[in-house]
Amino acid sequence: MTNKLARRIFYSLFLGGISVARSSDLDTIGVTLLREIDVTLVGSGVKVAQPEAAENVPDTAWQVNPAVSGQPTNLFTYISSDGIASNYPNALGIESGHANGVAANFFGISTGVAPGINHVDNYEANYFFLSKILTNVTIAAKIVNQSFIFTDDLSTQIAVNVEYDRYAAQKNVLFISGVGNSGPPSAPSTAYNGIGVGAFGGDSSVGPTPDNQRSKPDITAPAGATSFSAPLVAGGAAILAQAALRGDGGVGTTNAAFDSRTLKTLLLNGAVKPSNWTHTSSAPLDPRYGAGVLNVFNSYKQLAAGKHLFIESTTTSEGGLHFPGNNSNNLVSLVGWDFNSIANNPNQDRANHYYFSLPASTMKTFTLTATLAWNRQVNQTDINDLDLFLYDTSNSNLVAASTSRVDNVEHIFNTNLPAGRYDLQVLKKGGEGTILNNETYALAFETFALSLSISRTGTNVVLTWPIAPTGFTLQSSTNLNSLVSWMAVTNAPVMTTNQNNIVLGAATSAQFFRLVRP
């Protein structure tokens, strides 16, 4: 702990007015579809925290009014340096419009992503950081939403990151924080072990981080400002935490699925890429969108596909070639996740190999999205160097790689994989870039070839495509001339046996259809 952190902490509320999630926002982030599949996925059994910076000079306006969120008073505990209260109103503080807006998106009964959470600890933010994070006091919450920023200098930001990373690594708590509404991302969103959230379609800071050019934000969600996009992601994390606790990730996987690294990886890997999303092998996430736009449905489907262990582990000399190994087995699923560890000897690199086979299909190519995440360890200023590679096993050619030296997230997104057998590798470097010889990581992956089919029924045509992964829009055109604009089909799809179906009247002239993501 630095004397500066203990002596003086500044917070700033995000500007931009109160932004409550609309039904269309819940559609965009996959919550509406998820509840059609399972109405019980609402964050049940999960305890959360909402530290709030005070809106006024006396530092009293930081509390959520239970009535505004539609939740009962006994769902809340209010905590500050003046004490603890379980009633509302109380003598510790007064209502905050900002806190109400965050709560509405986080766990509001009608507008929230996770309205079924078990309990909310509403903290005054200065007290939360000084008396919980800095002093390493265990809190009850698994998911912590932080819609505030530190407004101090870069040295303070770096010190704040260390404190949050230490706490997250020790306590297995997932901190989800808005990156800010302008300029570069600010602490606490810049912590390695948390999730920094940008505002999709609103005012948002743009990465990379000012300290060492890391990829932040990690993900975005639709809102006018990042104060209100962050709780959408926090609500998604609560839903995944609920699913993990009840065993949706498979028999015997509860602890692994409930780990903050797994939750983070699944949230990022389920995100939908905007049309202008981009990244490089050394900068794994887009500086505007991170991994993309939150989609809780996709993340849940990857969790529910189960935990799948790597097929084999091999070692090479430090910096040596790490081609696919000799094991002929493949993953039994093209969708899923793993929570595992990788260890190297001095002067050696180790690779964990996840082999998979893409069958010949009427579709020419497949799409792969894969995300790897691990923690900065307790009281460390650097991270272990893990990388993510994709090889074609038929010729050992490298297809894609994510090899950032400064990030503890790696990400591969490839939309042009032909049928064949591939090796998705998690590589841990030996020698330089080694903090510890052993590292625990989470990996999420999904490979798919989405097909659109059309059939005729009487005077109508029926268009059908899978519900997973979601985030696709049906478009039509009267011909395939590149100068002709494609138009969105406005009919809402009807879900039947894991398929989307749209019925249209048969046209008297040629019509063409396609599926696109925004």
Image: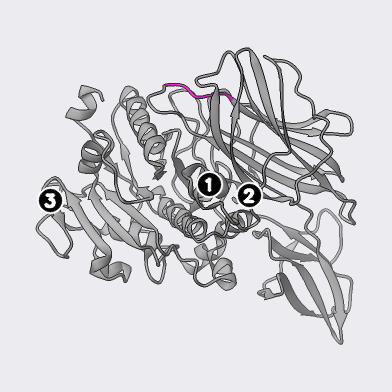
Q: In the picture provided, is 487 more to the left or to the right than 439?
A: right
Residue 308 placed where, x, y %? 67, 47
> Nearer the viewer's eye, disc 3 or disc 1?
1
Circle 3 residue: 83
Distance, label 2 to label 1, CA atoms, is 9 Å
Circle 2 residue: 307
Height in image: 365 above or below 472?
above
| Residue 383 is covered by the magenta coloring | yes
> Nearer the viewer's eye, disc 3 or disc 2?
2
Residue 338 placed where, x, y %? 62, 44
Distance, label 3 to label 2, CA atoms, is 43 Å
The numbered mark, 2 or 1, whose residue comes first in the sequence reads 1
User: Depth check: 506 or 91 in front?
Assistant: 91
Residue at screen point 64% across, 59% down: 471
For badge 2, the amino acid type reads Lys
Residue at screen point 58% across, 60% down: 297
For badge 1, the amino acid type reads Ala
Q: In the image, which residues are magenta?
A: 381-385
Height in image: 405 above or below 242?
above
Circle 1 residue: 256
The numbered mark, 3 or 2, whose residue comes first in the sequence reads 3
For badge 3, the amino acid type reads Gly
The residue carrying pointer 2 sits among few (fewer than 14), some (14 to 19) or many (20 or more) residues within 10 Å by Cα, namely many
User: Depth check: 38 or 513 in front?
Assistant: 38
Residues under numbered marks 2 and 1 in contact, where contact means CB atoms less than 8 Å apart: yes
Q: Quadrant of the C terminus?
A: bottom right
Residues under numbered marks 3 and 1 in contact, where contact means CB atoms less than 8 Å apart: no
Residue at screen point 18% across, 53% down: 61
Residue 479 placed where, x, y %? 86, 63
Corner quadrant of residue 160: top left
The numbered mark, 3 or 1, whose residue comes first in the sequence reads 3
Specify whether residue 364 is in view. Answer: yes
